Structure formats: C-alpha cells, structure tokens
Amino acid sequence: MEKIINNTLNLIYPPVCGFCQNICKDYICKKCSIRIKKYEIKNKNTFEVKDKTKYFDEICSYFKYEEIIRDMLINYKFNNKPYLYKTFSKIILNNKKICGFLKKYDIIIPVPIHKRRKQQRGYNQTELIAKEISKNLNIKIEKDILIKSINTRAQSELNKKDRQCNLKGAFKLQNMQKITNKNVLIIDDIYTTGSTVNECSRMIKLARAKSIGILTIAKD
C-alpha cells in the first residue's frame, strides 16, 4: 500500500533535484552534485569529541553552512519546503563512509521541536531526514524518548551564551529503558555552537546510553 501511495504521489508531484528544481528521480542531479562539492567538509571526517563540556562522543557533519547550502537549509526549515528532505537524505545515503558511521548505532533520535512549532511549520525537518535514513539503513528510530517540552526561542536568534541558557530544562525524557546500554545517534540539521545537540546528549546520558554520536547536515 505504501508503495502504491508513493508512486501516486510521484505522478502528482514528480521528484525533483532540490537545488535546481529539475525533474530528477534521484532527487539530486549530476550537475548539482558537482556544483555542491566545494561545500563538502573535506573527507567528511567523524571527529572524536574530547571536550569535557560535551556530552556526546563523536560528530559528523556533511557540509559547510555557506551560500547555496545555507539558502537551501533555510528554505527547508522555514519556507514550507518539506520535500527537500529527499535531497538531503539522498546525499547522505549515497556516501559509503557516512553510512558506515551511521551503521554503528542502534537507535536514531531526531532532535525534537515543540508541538506548537511543529503545528505551525507542519513538520519537523530533522525527523523527516531521520525517518529516511532509518528506513534505508534499517536503524530503529525513536520519537517518544526525547521530548521538547518548552517552546523556546529559536536558537538562530541568540548568541552563544544565550543559546546555552535558552535550552536549559527545555527537553524531557520518557521511556528511558529503550536506550539504556544502546548506541544512540542524534540527528540535527545545523551545528553552530552545538548547544542543542549537547543538551539533547546530556539528557540521553541520564538514560545511561552506551555512546552518543551526532550527525548534522551542515556545520557553521
């Protein structure tokens, strides 16, 4: 049934390259694949985190948050273009090194947004990407463990110090037993100061997760 629905949607809304909007069944055309290479973080290395103020163990970001990547992420997040998740997901899933990094994890947790913000936006941009990765790599996704219980100000409006304070007490944990002794991957869209993923990681540590990794589309 899901396949039939997807095929029908593809007829009504043909798959397009997220960058140039030309019809493209792979959601990113060859021309744009070449064009965006200059924004890729070299080797897309996974960095082990040794900073004691961080609660996660390693982080991997795909792009530099610049120019066309920045514009596309802003469109995706704030300008009602949820379909762009297909392009971002495809880019990640096409990279064998990144997929190798992801497959180390037992559970994916997308950074949650408050229910009021989700109603306003219509979707959680991080959750859409996390679902696609979960489906293709067969990694379980959990959306009922980490909850955004306070509708905080947008992090993009704040400086580094205020970003850290803004999130204190904003998340709560439930069903903690699901991630005890598990390797947990947190997925977010943009890494700027790291305040959001760090606060999420701090909460997940309380559930005695075995390890915590971070994947973001871009790093500022």
Image (cartoon, grey):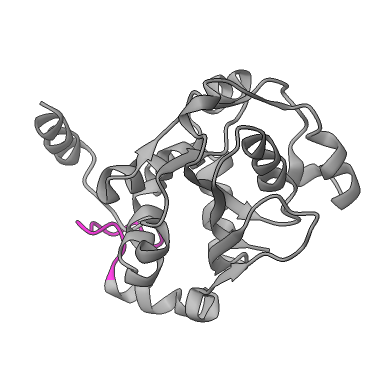
Q: Main secondary structure of the magenta part?
A: loop
Residue 103 position by quadrant: bottom left
**Residue closest to the eye, 90 or 48:** 48
Q: State left or right for residue 104 relative to residue 149.
A: left
State the image coordinates of residue 40 (x, y, percent, origin top left): 51, 74
Q: Residue at x 62, y 58 (%)?
A: 57
Q: Would you say 149 lies left or right of 142 here?
A: right
- Residue at image position (59%, 61%) is 58
Task: Provide residue 85's location: percent of width, then percent of height.
Answer: 40, 47
Name above or below for residue 156 compared with residue 122: below
Residue 42 appears in the picture as rendered: yes
Provide residue 138's location: percent of width, then percent of height.
27, 45
Residue 81 appears in view? no
In magenta segment, residue 165: no
Q: Nearer the viewer, residue 172 or 30?
A: 172
List x then y, in percent, for residue 14. Answer: 21, 46
Q: Is residue 25 magenta?
A: yes
What range of the chain is rendered magenta?
Answer: 19-29
Quarter placement of the N terminus: top left
Q: Residue furthest right?
A: 161
Query: Residue 70: which quarter of the image?
Result: bottom right
Q: Locate residue 208 relative to residue 23 in the image: left or right.
A: right
Above or below, 14 against 118 in this view is below
Which one is nearer the viewer's eye here, 219 or 103?
Answer: 103
Q: Who's the residue at 54% across and 68% down the image?
A: 63
Q: Does residue 57 appear to the left or right of 181 in the view shown?
A: right
Q: State the quadrant of the C terminus.
A: bottom right
